[in-house]
Amino acid sequence: MTNPLLQDWNTPFGIAPFDHIADEDFASALDTALRQHRDEIDAIATAKQPASFANTLEALEAAGKSLDKVLSVFFTVAGADSNPAREALQRQFSPQMAAHFSEISGNKALFARISQVWENKDALDLTPEQQRVLMLTHRSFVRAGAALSGDEETRMKEIKARLAVLGTDFTQNLLADERDWFMALEEGDLEGLPEFVINSARNAGEEKNAGGPVITLSRSLIVPFLQFSPRRDLREKAFKAWVARGANGGKTDNRSIAAETLALRQERANLLGYASFADYKLETEMAKTPQAVRDLLLAVWEPARAQADADAKILTDMMQTDGVNGPLAPWDWRYYSEKRRVAEHDLDEAALKPYFQLDRMIEASFACATRLFGLAFKPLDVPLYHPDCRAWEVTRNGAHVAVFIGDYFARGSKRSGAWCSAMRAQAKFPSVQAPVVINVCNFAKGDPALLSYDDARTLFHEFGHALHQMLSNVTYESVSGTSVARDFVELPSQLYEHWLEVPEVLSEFATHAETGAPMPQDMLDKVLAAATYDMGFQTVEYVASALVDLAFHDGAAPQDPMARQAEVLEALGMPAAITMRHATPQFAHVFAGDGYSSGYYSYMWSEVMDADAFEAFEEAGGAFDPARAAALEEHILSTGGSRDAGELYTAFRGRLPGVEALLKGRGLAAE
């Protein structure tokens, strides 16, 4: 037992001892942890005593702690700091894990005991949280195929194993395309670029050992390049590389993976008696049905497309005034939109960016949590998996609440996007454990690191997820933190973005990187006035992705997903100068795993609630109203999945919301 992954971690707050863990430790640790978990499951399934909540459901909650430790460390480093050894391990582990959990969900004796407790639930003296854990556990086993037998059971296991492999391959192909491509810039190519873009390009060039500045496919670098570069030829080259990720032919092409994934999901749903994968997936969400999702998205689509079409005409006129003939292209939109923003709002991103220092925005996100929830943040000096990472102890009234880790900078070893995960979730059973939560982002490095306004929103968004984990106060880990319906999980994160827009927050923390001066009032006013600028574009690119995702899963799986994508976009009347936010070959939300499959709409479903929820603060005493903050923690942030999502929101707000607040918040409501 010398493997550090399997030992007790006598570290501050039980943080993983990253400085003692080597890649060679993972495989043997996983084998041991899987064997231990299998033995624990067998003991539960073959127990002689009659099945009870304690010896079955609570025993399941207590099982697998070693496995949790191994996987939490591995998947953290595999996603945020990958290397060839870790990529090989991920390909090895994916089918192992799929087989392991298929074995558990297919354990007939175990399912019989869970069913026995479920059938006797009314005679048991269970707390509301225990009733919820029982219902969710029983339902998850049924939905995993526990009631199947014979050839159907065998086929379900095969499907799960294959889907695990495909999801890993999709992720690694996308990472390879993002890591391998870059566009070298000569000194003359830097003309027109603001200093922060040039600095980021030089830093990226150093990482790539390119001998000069480069543009990579990191969103935090390529988007400002598309905004500011007057070189239409370079914008076109960079944009085409960006949207071609996963579709370049050869071994990293994801198109056949997407097709096979959709076919297997459809077969999986049919085995369980559902007409489509969307019917299966949405049954447990707030939306419940594909039609409810479609109704929401189309209600937003029409005003968004109308706004985007009107904006496109203005940008086309600007482009033609520059002497560029022909239609507005996708690599033109951001460039001319930025020029229009400067003209109409007198708001220059290059002048704005020095006011959004990464460190100050971290301070701002912490300060809001202090005012709302009484949390305090103290830096921790502990070994982490990469020098870029930072850690803080989170306390309230002097008592330990959580450990928060931030990993903010883009690098070639990190997959794209931003995410939050709990390396250890909050629970009180079988013993009290405080959460260890990590936010991972992909911001461009700089000295100091400067964020765009959109980057700052991302930071607040992910910290909202972190608060959901850190303020969790439930008994059982299976309903802790973000273990909620997919279309509810984005509520805390999207709601927290609103505090970035609070004038007093910007006044205090948006200070100039060189002078330290606060953002001038006239600039602050312009930032807030421009909050819904270009919202037609942003909404169209998102909703198009969500509707394509839904179309992939609602009905028969398409044999050619790219053709189906084209059909959906044509039927919608997709503006020619806007592309999906995530085209199919790079749609990791949907194809890197089941997480957001048939569920990408959930950001907008949650936005309906977050717009309405922030209105509750404004209607009360303002953004920091203590009564509303206490209600938010009591009914949403602390409760995890211990109650139905609709019940939780109604408890907080008194009712469920309509789409009106969302349209108003996006500036798309009819005047």
Image (tube, helix red, strand yellow):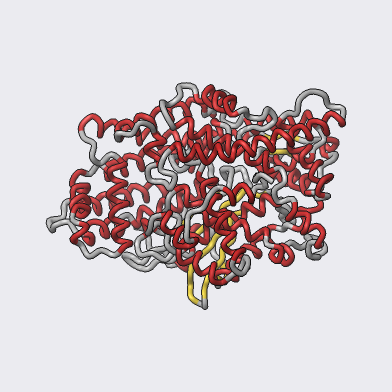
Q: Looking at the image, can residue 272 be seen?
A: yes
Please report the residue visible at 30 percent of the width from the left and 47 percent of the height from the top: 139
Image: 585 above or below 466? above
Q: Between 104 and 93, which is closer to the camera in this rendering?
A: 104
Q: Quadrant location of residue 189?
A: top right
- Front residue of 522 and 510: 522
In the image, residue 534 lies at what x, y percent?
71, 42
User: In which quadrant is the N terminus drawn?
Assistant: bottom left
Residue plotted at (44% across, 32% down): 553
Residue at 29% x, 65% y is 127
The quadrant holding residue 55 is: bottom left
Q: Is residue 261 above or below residue 33?
A: above
Residue occupying the far front of the picture:
671
Is 596 or 515 nearer to us in this picture?
Answer: 596
Q: Position of residue 491 (x, y in %)?
A: 52, 54
Compared with 637, 396 (above or below) is below
Name the side, left or right, on which 34 lies relative to 425: left
Horizontal side, residue 308 vs residue 122: left or right: right
- Which one is nearer the viewer's eye here, 95 or 126? 126
Q: How many marks?
A: 0
Q: Position of residue 187 (x, y in %)?
A: 84, 38
- In this view, the residue farthest toward the bottom is 398
Residue 371 at x, y = what percent? 60, 71
Q: In this image, 483 relative to 229: left or right?
A: left
Q: Inspect this view and state whether residue 17 appears.
A: no
